[in-house]
Image (cartoon, rainbow, N blue to C red):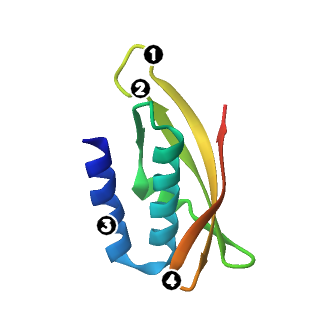
Amino acid sequence: MRKLLLLGVVAVLGACGGATGRAVSACEAAIAEKTQDKKFAIDTSDMAAKAQPEADNIIRIQSGIVFDPGMPREAKQTFECRVRVADGKADVISLQFIW
């Protein structure tokens, strides 16, 4: 179910076009891949709003993530994702969770 929702969000953001939308989609996919065994929630609107362009077609996104949302062990933290956007595609070059 989560993967289906993720694919829907990625498709919507991809349809929006632009480097920021592609960067957000790439980061979201990388987070989902890295946290396969955990439930999480991220705010893609917040990610897009906080996207910062850097040199060499790199976009840096720093935003929040909630692990196990709504559960007693819910944990909030920050992540930073850097994406290189070139030739219409986005590649995550770094992803780190900040405790």
Label whose residue precedes the other's in the sequence (1 or 3): 3
**Are dots 1 and 4 in contact, CB under 8 Å?**
no
Residue drawn at x 41%, y 49% as measured from the top left: 43
Q: Nearer the viewer, mark 1 or mark 3?
A: 3
Q: Residues within 10 Å of mark 1 (few under 14, many from 20)?
A: few
Q: Which residue is mark 4?
A: 88
The amino acid type found where label 4 is placed reads: Gly
Q: In the structure shown, which secondary structural element does the residue marked by tag 1 occupy?
A: loop
Q: CA distance from mark 1 to mark 4?
A: 39 Å
Q: Residue 65 location, x and y as percent?
A: 50, 39
Q: Which mark is residue 73?
A: 1
Q: Which residue is mark 3?
A: 11
Q: How many numbered marks have been drawn onto this rendered protein structure?
A: 4
Image height of 72 relative to 35, above or below:
above
The part of the image, by quadrant, that contains residue 17 is: bottom left
Image height of 40 relative to 68, above or below:
below
Q: Nearer the viewer, mark 1 or mark 4?
A: 4
Label whose residue precedes the other's in the sequence (2 or 3): 3
Q: CA distance from mark 3 to mark 4?
A: 15 Å
Q: CA distance from mark 1 to mark 2?
A: 7 Å
Q: Nearer the viewer, residue 10 or 64?
A: 10
Q: In the structure shown, which secondary structural element does the residue marked by tag 4 occupy?
A: loop
Q: CA distance from mark 1 to mark 3?
A: 31 Å
Q: Which residue is mark 2?
A: 68
Q: CA distance from mark 4 to mark 2?
A: 34 Å
The part of the image, by quadrant, that contains residue 73 is: top left
Q: Quadrant of the N terminus?
A: top left
**Are dots 1 and 2 in contact, CB under 8 Å?**
yes
Q: Which mark is residue 95?
A: none
Q: Residue 57 location, x and y as percent?
A: 67, 78
